[in-house]
């Protein structure tokens, strides 16, 4: 190797220039490294500041903590820097909420004693005085002999979750308070068919506490009235699926004391905010008193209707007897004057036949029986009924029959009385006069008809007037034999 003193001047100058370039390159790389380190450090600070978790490490010697190191993320959660924790060895405990310190100290003692411990949730007071909830999850480290040498703690800020839980708890308390004090029997059946909630009112109504139903979802079927059991079971089966609209129904239960109670039931599905089907919410109201009152009203109305019916029958008999006596008187006078009594006697005979028909109708009505006969020409029967009726002034009756009407099987006397009453009602509906139209024609009904009749061929007869019509609230009782809207002063068209 050539010594420096043996180098020529040119070689020395070359070496110096090379060294200068090398030093400049090293200085440039050093600056780049420092810049990169600064960028990485800043990014780390930003990340740790944004993360709501941080880690601290506790080193243990002979079962006692000797050093605690807090990660950079501690500032974001506690407001204190790692240096502040290092300067004050009791800062970690002093920042714990006073009410939670005993639990935290016990938690640490269990860790140092070598016990397995779960995560602990407690409150801290930040440097700025704000109270935060944290979750402290310890991870212990042991040496080869199983001796505790350190433990790490993961601190997570769970304040938002705690606030949400508290808000939910208060909401649940509020709604449970309302539900628990409602007068009706409220319940919620989950998607799995088990009860989620039953209000205490179920015991007031059924005699059984909520626990009976919670422990046995099928208990409801046991207390149903035998006549309503199958209907309710079918209803319960149909509604336990998503998309079923709100439903209502009435049924009876047998209470624990053996009483029969009427229940008005309504239910609707429960859907979460995310659209999940959570089951069915129901409400059962005791309507026994209302049902009993309605029964009393119906009984009273039936008794009143029977009284009006009896008065109407008496009126009809009185008219027949009056006319009969009059015709018999005319027959006697005709004999006294040497005239033929045949006409008044024939009239008297017709009146006797009317009285006999009336008695026949009363017997058939009381025994709920009919004497069915074949009527080959129903249009002739209808025409004869219309022709025999006395019409009020201003009333006109038109009849229209389809050609070739089929024969029918019916009680002729009841059919005559039916048409007579229908025409009388139509006349009363038009006190100022009007047109009554009677039509008859064949009709074929399928199994889906709304009349409750078997499928087949029928004769449809309609009586139509120009009156105001039947009030909607009276339609359900239209075929009740005891129902009437007429007072005792009106004896036409019972």
Image (spheres, rainbow, N blue to C red):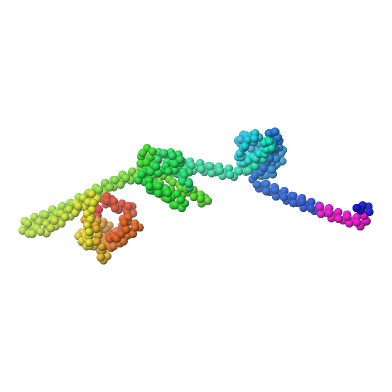
Residue 18 is a magenta residue: yes
Magenta stretch: helix, strand or loop mostly: helix
Q: Is 212 on the left or on the right of 45, as rendered?
A: left
Q: How many discs appear?
A: 0
Picture quadrant where residue 471 is located: bottom left
Picture quadrant where residue 132 is located: top right
Q: Which residues are magenta?
A: 7-26
Q: Looking at the image, which residue is at 22% across and 62% down?
A: 377
Q: Looking at the image, which residue is at 22% across and 51% down?
A: 364
Name the spot of residue 52 as percent of width and height, x first: 64, 45
Specify whether residue 443 is in view: yes
211, above or below 424, in the image: above
Name the spot of residue 182 as percent of width and height, x first: 44, 42
Q: Is 346 on the left or on the right of 83, as rendered?
A: left
Q: Looking at the image, which residue is at 26% across and 57% down?
A: 422
Residue 365 is a magenta residue: no
Q: Nearer the viewer, residue 244 or 330?
A: 244
């Amino acid at each position: 190797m050539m010594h420096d003193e043996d180098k020529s001047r040119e070689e020395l100058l070359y070496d110096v220039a090379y060294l200068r370039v090398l030093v400049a390159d090293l200085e440039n790389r050093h600056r780049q490294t420092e810049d990169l380190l600064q960028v990485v450090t800043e990014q780390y600070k930003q990340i740790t500041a944004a993360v709501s978790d941080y880690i601290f490490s506790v080193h243990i010697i002979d079962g006692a903590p000797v050093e605690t190191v807090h990660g950079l993320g501690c500032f974001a959660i506690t407001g204190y820097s790692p240096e502040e924790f290092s300067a004050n060895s009791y800062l970690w405990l002093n920042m714990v909420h006073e009410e939670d310190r005993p639990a935290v100290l016990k938690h640490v003692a269990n860790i140092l004693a070598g016990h397995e411990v779960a995560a602990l949730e407690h409150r801290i007071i930040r440097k700025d005085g704000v109270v935060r909830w944290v979750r402290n999850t310890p991870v212990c480290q042991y040496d080869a002999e199983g001796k505790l040498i350190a433990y790490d703690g993961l601190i997570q800020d769970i304040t938002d979750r705690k606030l949400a839980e508290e808000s939910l708890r208060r909401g649940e308390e509020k709604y449970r308070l309302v539900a628990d004090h409602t007068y009706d029997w409220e319940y919620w059946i989950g998607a799995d068919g088990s009860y989620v909630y039953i209000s205490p009112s179920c015991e007031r109504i059924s005699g059984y506490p909520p626990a009976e139903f919670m422990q046995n979802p099928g208990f409801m079927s046991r207390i149903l009235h035998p006549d309503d059991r199958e209907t309710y079971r079918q209803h319960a089966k149909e509604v336990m699926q998503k998309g079923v609209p709100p439903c209502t129904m009435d049924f009876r239960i047998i209470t624990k004391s053996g009483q029969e109670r009427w229940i008005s039931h309504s239910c609707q599905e429960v859907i979460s905010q995310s659209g999940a089907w959570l089951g069915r919410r129901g409400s059962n109201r005791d309507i026994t008193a209302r049902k009993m009152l309605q029964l009393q009203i119906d009984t009273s109305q039936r008794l009143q209707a029977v009284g009006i019916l009896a008065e109407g029958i008496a009126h009809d008999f009185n008219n027949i007897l009056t006319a009969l006596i009059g015709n018999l008187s005319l027959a006697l006078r005709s004999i006294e004057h040497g005239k033929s009594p045949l006409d008044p006697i024939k009239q008297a005979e017709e009146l006797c036949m009317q009285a006999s028909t009336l008695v026949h109708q009363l017997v058939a009505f009381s025994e709920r029986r009919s004497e069915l006969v074949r009527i080959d020409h129903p249009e002739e029967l209808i025409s004869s009924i219309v022709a025999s009726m006395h019409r009020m002034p201003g009333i006109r009756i038109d009849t229209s029959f389809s050609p070739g009407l089929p024969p029918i099987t019916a009680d002729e006397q009841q059919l005559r009385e039916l048409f007579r009453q229908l025409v009388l009602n139509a006349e009363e509906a038009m006190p100022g006069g009007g047109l009554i139209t009677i039509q008859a024609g064949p009709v074929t009904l399928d199994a889906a008809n709304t009349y409750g009749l078997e499928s087949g061929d029928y004769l449809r007869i309609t009586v139509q007037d120009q009156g105001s019509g039947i009030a909607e609230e009276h339609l359900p009782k239209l075929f009740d034999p005891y129902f009437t809207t007429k007072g005792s002063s009106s004896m036409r068209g019972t």
